[in-house]
Amino acid sequence: MTTPDSPARIYSMRENGLLGDPIIRLVFAGDSGVGKSAIFFAIADDVKTTEHIPTIGVDFRYKRLLVDSQPVKLQLWDTAGQERYRSISASYFRSADVVLLVFDITCRKSFTNLAEWVHCVDACKGVRPLYVVVGNKLDREDKREVSREEADAFAESLTAASFYVEVSALEGIHMDALVDRVAWEALKFNTGAIRQTVITIHTGAEGPTRAATMRNIFGSYC
């Protein structure tokens, strides 16, 4: 049965232009405990949290953006990392435009397990989405177990447009750069359009407005 908020219905409405503004559907994937929810809330609500409360099923938020003066809605879907919720997560992977593959830079196993998450997503979709590899917990650099070079190489092996970013959801490090580049690359990946050099991010009806040039987005921020 298709519910009003089911992935199938949302995808169908988006494809038929019934939701108005273009939608970038971003789904989080990765092991439990790597900080997916922390990144999720940092992007959606500008909230920093140190608590680890496992996601039950999925959580949803959206963020409004302007990309080259075009209003865009960034849908954020945080999926559970536990094995018992994989079947639920799979239903959201099917209609994802972007999949954020999140791992903990201090836990090598969470990185090696990304290959399994890619297999899970690929099994759900006929065409690969834009994969963005995100190394979280940059604030614990001294505990690093995965090099940037290795993570970069993994991202480059996924799709031509895939890329790697390191962040700290706890400290808010590189979070703006992550959102900027995801929005830019997702639109290019899904439409092939060449955008202008300025992206303006609106964090909410009453929230601040931020402009970022391509120099900021593609500069050295990792």
Image: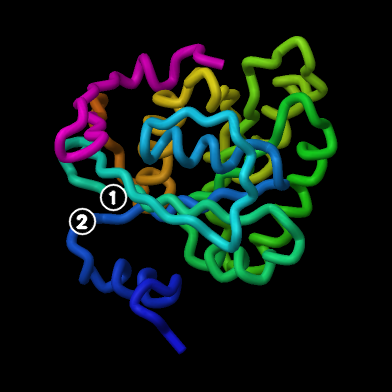
Residue 52 in percent (x, y) is at 64, 39
Mark 1 neighbour density, 10 Å: few (under 14) some (14–19) many (20 or more): some
**What is the quadrant of residue 167 in the picture?**
top right
Give the label on residue 34, or none: none
Query: How was the colour assigned to the protein in this rendering?
Result: rainbow
Residue 198 in percent (x, y) is at 24, 25
Residue type at numbered disc 2: Asp
Tell me whether the residue at label 1 lies in contact with that at label 2, contact meaning CB atoms closer than 8 angstroms. yes
| Residue stretch in magenta | 200-222
Residue 82 in percent (x, y) is at 73, 56
SS for callout 1: strand
Vertical relation: 181 (above or below) 85 = above
Q: CA distance from mark 1 to mark 2?
A: 7 Å
Left or right: residue 71 compared with residue 130: left
**What is the quadrant of residue 18 in the picture?**
bottom left
Mark 2 neighbour density, 10 Å: few (under 14) some (14–19) many (20 or more): few
Residue drawn 53% across and 65% down? 92
Viewer-proximal residue among 178 and 47: 47
Residue 61 in percent (x, y) is at 38, 51
Give the label on residue 21, or none: 2
Left or right: residue 182 compared with residue 83: left
Vertical relation: 7 (above or below) 161 = below
Residue drawn 25% across and 47% down? 72
Mark 1 or 2, nearer chain start? 2
Residue type at numbered disc 1: Lys
The quarter of the image holding the C terminus is: top right
Residue drawn 62% across and 45% down? 53
Give the label on residue 73, or none: 1
For residue 22: magenta?
no
Vertical relation: 32 (above or below) 177 = below
